[in-house]
């Protein structure tokens, strides 16, 4: 198996309530429809990258419970390399409680569970896998000391690093300088840059600030406003695709995973962004995190429908 992308990240079981509206503090909304799906930012991005055609290995930590076993079997079915997945005997698989309203907006609470077992010491056991990667993809739903350790190790190995700093938190220049790709949403862009990103001019200014921190490219996803990306040689705003969202839960993860898949397949950046943007838009029309990640044919069909 080729080792194109190694994802180091979280895995959760998503417990989803579809509601007429998101509850206010102290309010009970009694019209929910319940479902569950596999999720977690690391797992979502892994699945999205694999379905988009990349060879993907996943470093994560699951509980040795029914949820963990179900997720492990699903990863194998999709064709993901699971040889480096840790299974904790004494900690349950991570869980996310997700509320989704009729507009597709969501609120999420995460109980990390086994994700907190993903330590720097375990990463050392995965050094051979990381040394063979073309791209290493990270998020922030695992212990931050582990993220820092992976960035330092990957940089020392001369690897391309893609970071999606979600959930949002402040990062130092030393975390951003080694990056090949930094992909952020509006909240993350504002937090990292210390600037508002409400207008087009503000988005551009924040993007330039983040690029000056060291990454080779910066990508800012803007929801219905589209995607802005820039490198030292080019910058461009890409329009959003006009869809009616059902659930936006994993749209950002689908974008990241699919973008990573396109980059290791040596697609031109503009084409890679367009393809990932289409995949993310398509994912919002399907309920659930990993169930919403489209395959290559679905993305192609969508692009054929929505050519500008």
Image: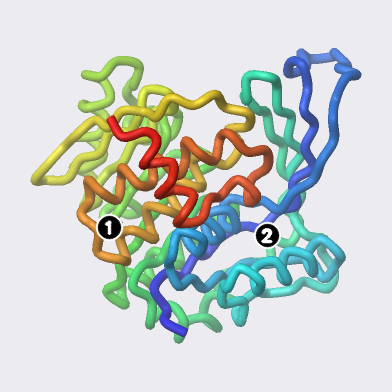
Residue 87 visible here: yes
- At 82% across and 40% down in the image, what residue appears? 35
Measure the C-alpha gap from mark 1 to mark 2.
25 Å
Q: Residues within 10 Å of mark 2 (few under 14, many from 20)?
A: many
Which secondary structure, mark 1?
A: loop
Quarter of the image for residue 23 reads top right
Residue 121 visible here: no
Give above or below for 220 relative to 134.
Answer: above
Residue 215 x %, y %: 25, 51
Give above or below for 90 relative to 51.
Answer: below
Q: In this view, does 276 lie to the left or right of 140?
A: left
**Which color mode does the image show?**
rainbow
- At 36% across and 67% down in the image, what residue appears? 135
Residue 141's label in the rendered image is none
Residue 117 x %, y %: 68, 66
Q: Do the residues labelled 1 and 2 touch (CB within 8 Å)?
A: no
Toward the left, the furthest residue is 233
Residue 282 x %, y %: 50, 39
Q: Is residue 79 left or right of residue 185?
A: right
Residue 180's label in the rendered image is 1
Q: In this view, does 167 lie to the left or right of 268?
A: right
Which secondary structure, mark 2?
A: helix
Q: In which quarter of the image is the C terminus?
A: top left
- Return the disc, 1 or 2, that comes first in the chain's sequence: 2
Q: Which residue corresponds to mark 2? A: 115
- At 73% across and 62% down in the image, what residue appears? 114
Give above or below for 27 relative to 238.
Answer: above
Between label 1 and label 2, give the one nearer the viewer.
1
The residue lying toward the viewer, choosing from 286 and 55, is 286
- At 73% across and 64% down in the image, what residue appears? 71
The residue lying toward the viewer, choosing from 51 and 214, is 51
Residue 118 x %, y %: 63, 67
């Amino acid at each position: 198996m080729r080792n194109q992308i190694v994802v180091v990240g979280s895995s959760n079981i998503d417990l989803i309530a579809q509601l007429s509206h998101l509850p206010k503090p102290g309010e009970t909304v009694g019209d929910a429809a319940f479902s569950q799906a596999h999720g977690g930012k690391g797992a979502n991005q892994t699945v999205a990258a694999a379905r988009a055609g990349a060879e993907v290995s996943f470093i994560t930590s699951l509980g040795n419970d029914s949820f963990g076993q179900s997720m492990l079997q699903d990863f194998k079915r999709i064709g993901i390399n699971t040889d480096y997945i840790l299974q904790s005997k004494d900690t349950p698989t991570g869980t996310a409680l997700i509320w989704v309203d009729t507009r597709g907006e969501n609120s999420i609470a995460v109980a990390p569970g086994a994700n907190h077992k993903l330590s720097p010491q375990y990463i050392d056991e995965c050094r051979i896998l990381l040394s063979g990667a073309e791209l290493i993809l990270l998020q922030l739903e695992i212990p931050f000391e582990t993220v820092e350790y992976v960035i330092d190790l990957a940089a020392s190995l001369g690897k391309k690093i893609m970071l999606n700093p979600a959930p949002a938190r402040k990062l130092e220049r030393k975390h951003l300088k080694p990056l090949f790709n930094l992909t952020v949403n509006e909240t993350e862009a504002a937090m990292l840059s210390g600037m508002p990103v409400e207008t087009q001019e503000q988005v551009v200014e924040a993007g330039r600030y983040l690029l000056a921190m060291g990454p080779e490219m910066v990508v800012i996803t803007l929801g219905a406003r589209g995607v802005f990306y820039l490198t030292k040689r080019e910058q461009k705003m890409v329009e959003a695709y006009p869809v009616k969202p059902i659930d936006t839960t994993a749209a950002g993860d689908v974008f990241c995973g699919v973008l990573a898949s396109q980059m290791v397949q040596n697609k031109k950046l503009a084409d890679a962004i367009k393809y990932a943007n289409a995949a993310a838009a398509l994912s919002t029309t399907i309920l659930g995190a990993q169930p919403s990640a489209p395959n290559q044919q679905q993305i192609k069909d969508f692009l054929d429908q929505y050519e500008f």
